Amino acid sequence: MKELEYPFDGDRLLSKKKSIRRELLSQDTKFIEKKIAILGGSTTNDIKALLDLFLLNNGIKAEFYESEYNKYYEDAMFDAPKLVEFKPDIIFIHTTSVNIRNYPEIRDSAEEVEGKLASVYGEFEGMWEHLREKYGCPIIQNNMEYPNVRLLGNSDCVNTHGHVNFVNRLNAKFSEYAASHENFFIHDINYLAARIGLDTFFDPFYWYMYKYAVAVPAIPEFSYSLSHIIKAIYGKNKKAFVLDLDNTLWGGVVGDDGPENLEIGKETAEGEAFLAFQEYLKAHKDIGVLLNVSSKNEEENALAGLNHEEGALKPDDFTVIKANWEPKSINVETIAGELSLGADSFVFVDDNPAEREIVEANIKGIAVPAVTTPDKYMREIDRHGYFEVLKLSKDDLSRNEMYKANIRRAETLKTFTNYGDYLKSLEMKAVIRPFEPVYMARIAQLTNKSNQFNLTTRRYTQGEIEEAAKERLTFYGKLADKFGDNGVVTVAIGRVEDAVCHMELWLMSCRVLKRDMELALLDKIVHTCLEHGVREIRGYYYPTAKNAMVKEFYKELGFEKISEDAEGNTQWKLDISEGYTDKNKYIDVE
Amino acid sequence: MTREEAYSKLNEVFRDVFDDESIEVNDATTANDIEGWDSLEHINLVVAVEKCFGIKFNMGEVAKLKNVGEMMDLILSKIG
């Protein structure tokens, strides 16, 4: 819903939140349901209400637990029975600098100040450790905004007795913990408060009247920022850009003005703004976001513009470049197809409102930020949190290359008349093994990101993946070929019961479709099952809006359908014995 | 702005905040008359009223209000 996208009208959201909620629920959305526990150090009522709206807008329907006012610590440490019973999927600890009860005083000795820092921090760390142990779910913790007043004025940030200094050091310790612990995320309210203004973020009126440590008018921004982390945890991040060229990546029209007359580079104010925007986009490659172009231009002109020597982006930085006269909505669909991504995982950037409207009207779920002028493009995109990073993986760094390798594979395929010959020519090598510690994060990420080739669409947190590794038959598969390494691309989990292995999860990344990786995995599953005395494998397919492509997957593997209910959920079985013949012919499995 | 005009605006605010199109407030209306008007919703009401009339309440004022009539007096005194 447009009303819930940046730049939103926060006051309107606050006053109309009930009717907006009703509208969101009446839309034809298939929600995922999650339980979120809010452990608050101040009033959380509207924080919850607004978070609810932003999550619904991302397809997440949350059930909430709220601690009693300022009982976050007691709830966390003493296992509040209602919280235990609630079984949270996510715990959010809403503390702010009003919860720092033990600030240094001027008369404190250096040791006393250090002692206070250690004790304030220690209380938090103890709480996090206890929650991790007890619930094993992702934890989101606010860091601290700056205090509202400064006894020492500007020296408050220098002198170790200063509260600003104290908050800075405490925040650094929070970040250190987050950087070294899985499944723990900082909600950076220090940045948020700076961005919207500390006096807007904290207003004594709301604090004394209602114990709101975040002023009510600031709550929409607060909850919006928090929702970015949660939607990222559940795989709702965008994955790629589709960018216009003329007046989006440079000033001017390359076909009319000629590449030499474009506004790009350090020479003019406008040129500098476009250059900064290009650099910002280019940096996205390193966090695994794919860059693509859809431009109404002759290809030759588009490339001439991109080869401008002052520009930061070069043709090689893009995975797909479509320079033609087709409607842009069609180009976006084509790009999505070539990259095997859903069109709703794209962010479309174009200075022309008419083009934006066409794309938005024709592609459900695509993000189309309303950019205005080049100096503001970056900010207007950044605020949406489209690509909220939880953790960087090596895969992110090389994702652009992987996709490009895929496009080269597609080109190679055209030279073969026999698909088997093509597969053979790829010289594929796979590793298929039980879950291993180094891949737990990537495996959890895949279970949350994969929508299309996903039989049960079960989402797992990293904690649950680690749990599964101990109690289930688990499989991850990596696939490499002569064009490059795709990294971890497939995951399966089976639960063995009475000599039957129930496949609770089977998913594969769409970038390795039609490479027989699923056959290699089946072979491995069968052999592993036989070693465990399993005689039958049971497959499950649960339909979602996105996984129709695997509706007949088990049938294709030779399973027999044993049941189907009204919703289209199906069950399949495969009897196995020692005489099993491997199905994979082209992948060399280690 | 007449008291009547102000009431028609105020009524809209109440309807939005409490999500009830049937609400009609008058001088004698109190929190007991409206479903969902608890201390937490009160803050939303205050924020919405401030926004609607372009005014700011201070702490003492908000705490003292006993009914909608007093709120209206305060609003009218602020918009002058």
Image: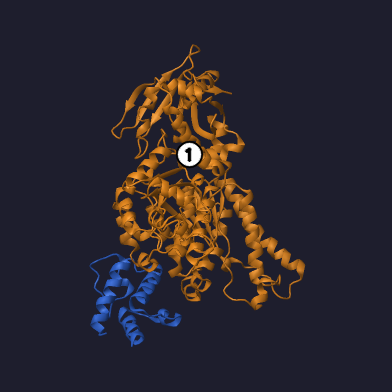
* Quadrant of image for the N terminus of chain A: bottom left
Q: How many marks?
A: 1
The image quarter in which residue A478 lies = top right
Label 1's element? helix
Amino acid on which disc 1 is placed: Thr
Task: State the residue position of label 1.
Answer: A447
| Residue drawn where x is 27% and y is 74% of the image | B11
Q: Nearer the viewer, residue A184 or A315?
A: A315
Q: Estimate the x, y position of residue A69 in percent, counting from the top left.
A: 50, 64
Q: Is residue A530 above or below residue A312?
A: above
Q: Nearer the viewer, residue A366 or A163?
A: A366
Q: Is residue A97 above or below residue A5?
A: below
Q: Is residue A230 above or below residue A514?
A: below
Note whether residue A332 is visible.
yes
Query: Disc 1: which chain?
Result: A
Q: Which chain is blue?
A: B
Note whether residue B26 is visible.
no
Determine the colour of chain A: orange
Q: Estimate the x, y position of residue A588 in percent, counting from the top left.
A: 55, 22
Q: Estimate the x, y position of residue A266 in percent, counting from the top left.
A: 54, 62
Looking at the image, which residue sits at the far top?
A579
* Quadrant of image for the C terminus of chain A: top right
